[in-house]
Image (spheres, helix red, strand yellow):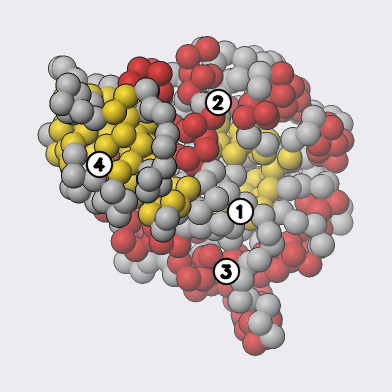
Amino acid sequence: MDRAMQSYFKWSDWIIGFLCLLRFCDSLNNGLALTPPMGWMSWQRYRCNVDCYNYPNDCLSEMLIKRIADLMVSEGYKDAGYEYLIIDDCWLNKTRGRNGELLEDAERFPSGMKNLSNYIHGKGLKFGIYQDFGNFTCAGYPGLFGHLEQDAQTFADWDVDYIKVDTCYSYDNLEELEDGYSNFGQMLNKTGRQMVYSCSWPAYFELSSNKKPNYDILKQVCNLWRNYGDIEDDWSDVLDILDWFAANQERFASYAGPGQWNDPDMLLLGNYGLSYEQSKSQMVLWAILAAPLLMSADLAEIRPEIKDILQNKDIIEINQDALGIQGTLILTKVNINVWMKPIQPVVDDSQSYAVAFLGRMKGGYPYRLVISLNELQINSSESYMVTNILDPYKEGNVVLSKDEFVSVTVKPSGVVLLKFVPVEENKNLLYSKRIDEDFLIPDFQ
């Protein structure tokens, strides 16, 4: 670290400490992201493609962002809950302006960011943007360092609603990053404009350091944070992230909740790397994890069956459940991972649950798992109404007592998603099926 940077952090550390003494650091408390953010982000699909001559429809540009905004509205994504349109790295000019201000690339964004923000807001959407805490962004554009207050005000002037801050070309000291990100968060709050604050520093330390992030600090500073490496357009990456989240869930799952979310990265649906079954699986597991649902695909090219998954209101309802509890892996049997997320409604003090059965086999035939509600630890109520979320009309609503069994048949890399809702005592309800002598174990597929 050079002397200028050391001097800066010595001063910023004093400021942060003073503010904390005044109880400014007790909580982020910006009232935002009370459920996991939903929207679209440019990186996975469009990366840092700035070659608009050879790739006029696939380069990161004003034309692309306006086209995506139009599609989010016309194709029903906005109505489904996807509200943030976030431009990732490579929107910037390679140098700052005469007064140190950030500038957009004038060739690719000729109308300027304020006008683009107005266009997005005019569609009823919210505008998100990317920066980096270091001297440069990951792609080599001007970073925040030395301009925190100036850049925060610039984003406020552009009416930004969501800011993702990366950690490339930054510090290898965890405490300095914690203080620096906190400082920038204070600068954002100082502008008076509310902006969802997405932080990336935890991922860098989870992957490259023996020292782990302090999640108590994180939830005070950021609305969401990346825990792990970037996702790539491949099923193996989805599994890698899920396995890492499962292995470390005891450390950080409990920190998720309204206004503060663990972020396993973008949805791959609609791109090239996932099959139909795998697309359902990622969407369902991200819902169980209470993860941000950020698409990153060409919305004009998404096949109807993938669009149906992305807009499935029942999956989205589980993700957006107001309790904000992150689901966890509870057991693995016969090559099937069982993930559970407590959800609403709570009936007579008994919790409802969303349970995902994920097939981990790489090929062959669908596996069948027969399991009791007791083994699933769904037993605080005498009986539960069970719904197959991905195919609600196949079995209808089935009522099971807590001592009975359920069967699921799961395809390789596929998923079954069941919802268990406690049945109120002595409530006279009509169901399409009941458990009796002729229907002992319902099989969900």
Rendered residue at 15%/17% (across/down): 364
Provide the secondary structure element on which disc 4 rests: strand
Q: Residue 49: name its quadrant.
A: top right
Mark 2 is surrounded, within 10 Å at the Cα level, by few (under 14), some (14 to 19) or many (20 or more) other residues, namely some
Q: Position of residue 20 (x, y in %)?
A: 64, 82
* Viewer-side label of 3, 2: 2
Provide the secondary structure element on which disc 3 rests: helix
Q: Residue 125: name its quadrant.
A: top right
* Residue receiving disc 3: 220
Mark 1 is surrounded, within 10 Å at the Cα level, by few (under 14), some (14 to 19) or many (20 or more) other residues, namely some
Provide the secondary structure element on which disc 1 rests: loop
Q: For marks 1 and 3, give the CA distance.
A: 14 Å
- How many numbered circles does the render carry? 4
* Residue receiving disc 2: 311
Mark 4 is surrounded, within 10 Å at the Cα level, by few (under 14), some (14 to 19) or many (20 or more) other residues, namely some
Which three-letter amino acid code belongs to the residue tagged 2?
A: Gln
Q: For marks 2 and 4, give the CA distance.
A: 32 Å
